[in-house]
Amino acid sequence: MYSLLLAIIYVAFVSLGLPDSLVGSGWPVMHEDLAVPLAYAGIITMLIAGGTIASSLLSERLTRRFGAGLVTAVSVGMTAAALLGFSVTGSFWVLCLWAIPYGLGAGAVDAALNNYVALHYAARHMNWLHSFWGVGASISPFVMSHAITSGLGWSGAYRIIGVVQVVLTGLLLASLPLWGKVHPRVPAHDAEPSTHDGEPTFTHDGEPAPAHEPTTRGGHVPLATALRIPGVPLVLLAFFAYCALESTSILWASTYLVTDRGVTPATAAAFASLYLLGITGGRFLAGFVADRVGDRALIRGGFLTVALGVVLIALPLPTPVLALAGLVVAGLGSAPIYPAIIHSTPVNFGRNSSQAIIGIQMAAAYSGSTFMPPLFGVLSGWVGLWIFPLFVGVLAVLGLVMSERLSGLVARRASTSVPSSDAAASRTP
């Protein structure tokens, strides 16, 4: 059952990545067919992001009531319906309406699946699963290209991916009996079971609680309560910073290389794609060492490697070779950060609180990836694109500092064996 459900979750992560590149890859044709300006893509992406943030924040309540399996299945079904809706509409404003369930489904399934994997599977699987997400995101532009060149049009690409999502929805519904039979993992790498007055403490699942995992009790954890748990603001800032630097690099790195480093557009585009391939390949490689080195080391090493890549990009040398290499290095450094932050959440904040906190983390992630690239665009218009490595570097330092402060807080909690977040959660009516 463990392996069968894991295989289904792997397929789900590939399928989750499939829709994410469709709007960007198809918009040059879509906006002409819909008779709207090119800039209207921002409206679609903002609506999707808004729905994603909202459903991420609601994911904890939904998952507690209906279970991770059913929430995942229904959310994928919503995404499938939205994609099929995209495929049959010829109006931009109807497209905007379909973008709402598109975002709502994406946010809920992302938070529910990430929390389930964090609770039940080892760190290597979290890295590999997110690598498979990158595979799905890389495939969809080819699906869009094939649909356009074969005469199916951009709507054909949405129809193909929509049908894939419908099939996945059926598979997830059929797998519902398995979700409750896979036992939660015992986090054994980063901590030993904690004790209080010489007796071991336990999570609400009846498992030994690691020394730095706050023992948790109770049911629903409201948003306000989750935000008051010590360390949560730190992890939210770290996650916001990471997703902001990743999305800013994806959107602006190629333009920076062309305008400020004299790289040809073709070369810049190729190396910008290598940044994404570095993330995907880096997560696959990180999976082989994740269980041995631990989430904290992966996060620290990831941010430091990104910082090294940024330094290489910024060096004012007459040749752009190091800048191009720096972009690849930054991609490899980015690879383990997202999965490791997610995977460490139950250990850092307790199993009972993890779904609520992962939902908030997803909202912080989407906020960073949605709002920071446009902010960089505004700043670079005022100051110049030369600030790209400085902008990304500041985000990398912010992420590193916040994650290190969280590690220090967790270490102090482990040394005193005080389940601080449990007290905050237990005060909630």
Image (spheres, helix red, strand yellow):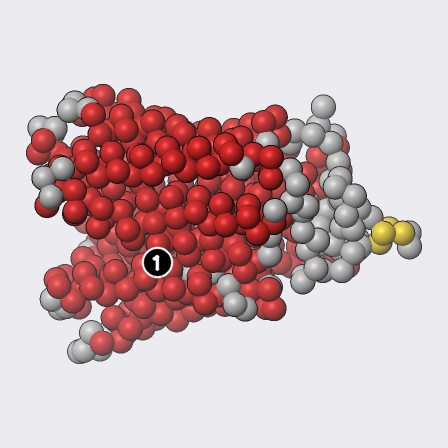
Task: Give the percent coordinates (x, y) of residue 96.
Answer: 26, 25
Left or right: 18 in relation to 232: left
307, 130: nearer the viewer: 130
Left or right: 1 in relation to 260: right
Q: What's the residue at 70%, 53% (across, down)?
A: 186
Left or right: 368 in relation to 1: left
**Rendered-image quadrant of the C terminus:** top right
Amino acid on which disc 1 is placed:
Val
Q: Which residue is mark 1?
A: 392
Q: Is residue 229 visible?
A: no
Above or below, comparing residue 1 to residue 36 in the picture: below
Above or below, comparing residue 316 to residue 166 in the picture: below
Task: Give the percent coordinates (x, y) of residue 315.
Answer: 28, 74
Q: What's the residue at 80%, 46% (across, down)?
A: 202
Task: Give the percent coordinates (x, y) of residue 83.
Answer: 29, 31
Q: What's the residue at 15%, 24% (across, down)?
A: 90
Task: Give the percent coordinates (x, y) of residue 269.
Answer: 18, 61
* Quarter of the rendering containing residue 175: top right
Q: Given the current orientation, which residue lies at the most extreme bottom position?
A: 318
